[in-house]
């Protein structure tokens, strides 16, 4: 064995340095070849090949994936991961989209983006082991409050006036549902009445995607100005309340079918169109075409589902200890609606028809209070819930802020409130 001083002499040291230099050079070349700079990575992304497929009728996940060159094993793994990690088991025609990403034209798919809604994306990527990883992302909404106002003109319906004011059809339907608790759209709409709506518009990357919720509505009804505000309580639940924080949503709706024309009013003395003699008309008739869905005016339990000569096919619902409603002349009952069934407000219980003593398709609607038939258009309906003291204080502050914002938007109709 040589001594250390003989091993580390000048010649040996030179050779060792040269060997190390060569090794370091090789390592540097390897790193440069395998590690891309941020600029190179951006360039690689720019060169990616992306294709977007809208799911059509008859499409399945398997069919779409196989068309992109994926194997049956990939299809099975992707289907399993989507169901387990993203709760996606089926694709919906004309609604869902799939984005396929390749590093370049001739490369296999490296990433799949499933887009079930504008506000949610599911990314699937294939790792080095050939397994598919799943990541779900929620897209942040840019929510803007928009104000629209209008006036009823001669010959107008509220719907026509709302369209003229630029209110989207879906928002008008929501406003109908809210105001139907307080108004009769057949009798309460008159020329000269003014109305306003504050509602949400949802944007993403500066582009409008859809409309959101109604935040506030005002209508100059015959029985006084109706105002409703959407408010979130301290327990996280939301509801609509009047100016004073009292529940604006009643337990029953006066007009179950939106925008239906009243053909016969509540009366204690009416000549029956079929029987020919005078007797009380204990409800209100709404004209609608055969097959129009009939929603329950309020939540409750079905206590009758039957047929008689006068009402034809009818359903009767008990809502609480005081109120019951009856729906008559149905063409047929809704599936699953039987005696004892609990129904929610707005749930379809049957379909408009002309069974029983009837001259044409319509809905005969009755409200019974404490065993006595009352006029659905004028009876005082109980609210579902009012705000407690603490929530009411916060609501008043919120309502004042919202009112001030709407005043500014009324002066500047092209502006919006960022929420």
Image (spheres, grey):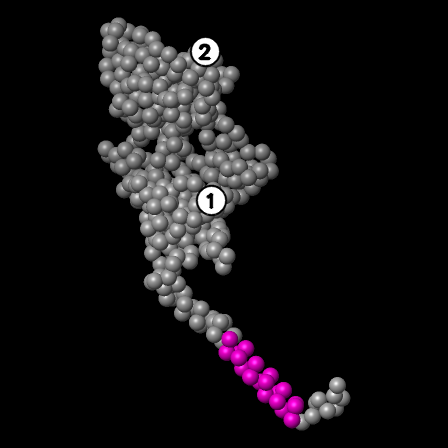
> Residue 297 in the image: x percent, y percent?
41, 24
Find residue 269 and report its image quarter. Answer: top left
Q: Residue at x 33, y 14 (%)?
A: 313
Q: Examine the rendering and report whether any part of residue 111 can be seen.
A: yes
> Residue 249 in the image: x percent, y percent?
46, 30
* Side (left or right) of 224 relative to 134: left
Alpha carbon separation for disc pair 1 and 2: 57 Å
Q: Nearer the viewer, mark 1 or mark 2?
A: 1
Q: Residue at x 45, y 11 (%)?
A: 371
> Residue 312 in the image: x percent, y percent?
31, 12
Kindly give the residue lying farthest to the front in the view shown: 1
Q: Residue at x 43, y 46 (%)?
A: 76
Q: Residue at x 29, y 24 (%)?
A: 291
Question: Against 38, is 8 above or below?
Answer: below
Magenta stretch: give its range. Answer: 11-30
Find residue 307 and report its image quarter. Answer: top left
> Residue 8 in the image: x percent, y percent?
70, 89
Question: Against 324, is 293 above or below?
Answer: below
Q: Examine the rendering and report whether any part of residue 267 can be seen.
A: no
Queried whether the magenta region covers residue 28, the answer comes back as yes
Q: Which residue is mark 2?
A: 371
Closer to the camera in the image, 261 or 405 = 261
Which sits earlier in the primary sequence, circle 1 or circle 2? Answer: 1
The residue carrying pointer 2 sits among few (fewer than 14), some (14 to 19) or many (20 or more) residues within 10 Å by Cα, namely: few
The residue carrying pointer 1 sits among few (fewer than 14), some (14 to 19) or many (20 or more) residues within 10 Å by Cα, namely: some
């Amino acid at each position: 064995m040589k001594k250390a001083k003989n091993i580390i002499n000048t010649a040996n040291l030179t050779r060792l340095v040269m060997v190390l230099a060569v090794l370091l050079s090789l390592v540097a070349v390897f790193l440069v070849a395998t590690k891309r700079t941020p600029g190179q990575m951006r360039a690689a992304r720019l060169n990616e090949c992306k294709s977007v497929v809208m799911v059509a009728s008859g499409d399945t996940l398997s069919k779409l994936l196989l068309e992109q060159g994926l194997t049956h094993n990939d299809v099975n793994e992707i289907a399993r991961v989507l169901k387990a990690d993203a709760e996606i088991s089926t694709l919906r025609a004309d609604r869902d989209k799939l984005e396929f990403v390749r590093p370049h034209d001739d490369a296999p798919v490296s990433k799949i983006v499933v887009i079930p809604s504008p506000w949610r994306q599911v990314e699937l990527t294939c790792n080095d082991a050939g397994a598919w990883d799943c990541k779900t992302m929620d897209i942040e909404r840019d929510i803007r409050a928009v104000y629209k106002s209008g006036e009823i003109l001669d010959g107008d319906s509220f719907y026509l006036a709302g369209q003229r004011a630029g209110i989207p059809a879906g928002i008008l339907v929501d406003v109908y549902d809210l105001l139907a608790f307080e108004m009769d759209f057949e009798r309460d709409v008159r020329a000269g009445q003014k109305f306003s709506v504050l509602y949400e518009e949802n944007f993403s990357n500066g582009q409008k995607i859809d409309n959101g919720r109604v935040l506030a509505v005002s209508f100059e009804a015959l029985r006084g100005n109706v105002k409703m505000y959407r408010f979130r309580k301290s327990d996280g639940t939301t509801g609509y309340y009047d100016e004073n924080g009292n529940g604006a949503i009643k337990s029953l709706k006066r007009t179950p079918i939106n925008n239906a024309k009243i053909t016969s009013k509540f009366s204690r003395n009416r000549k029956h169109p079929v029987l020919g003699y005078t007797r009380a008309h204990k409800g209100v008739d709404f004209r609608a075409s055969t097959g129009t869905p009939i929603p329950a005016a309020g939540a409750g339990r079905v206590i009758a589902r039957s047929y008689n000569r006068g009402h034809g096919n009818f359903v009767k619902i008990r809502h609480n200890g005081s109120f019951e409603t009856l729906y008559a002349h149905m063409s047929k009952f809704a599936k699953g609606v039987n005696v004892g069934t609990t129904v929610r407000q707005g749930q379809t219980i049957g379909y408009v028809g002309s069974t029983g003593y009837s001259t044409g398709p319509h809905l005969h609607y009755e409200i019974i209070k404490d065993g006595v038939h009352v006029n659905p258009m004028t009876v005082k309906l109980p609210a579902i819930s009012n705000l407690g003291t603490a929530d009411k204080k916060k609501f008043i502050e919120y309502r004042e802020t919202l009112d001030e914002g709407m005043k500014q938007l009324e002066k500047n109709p092209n502006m919006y409130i960022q929420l």
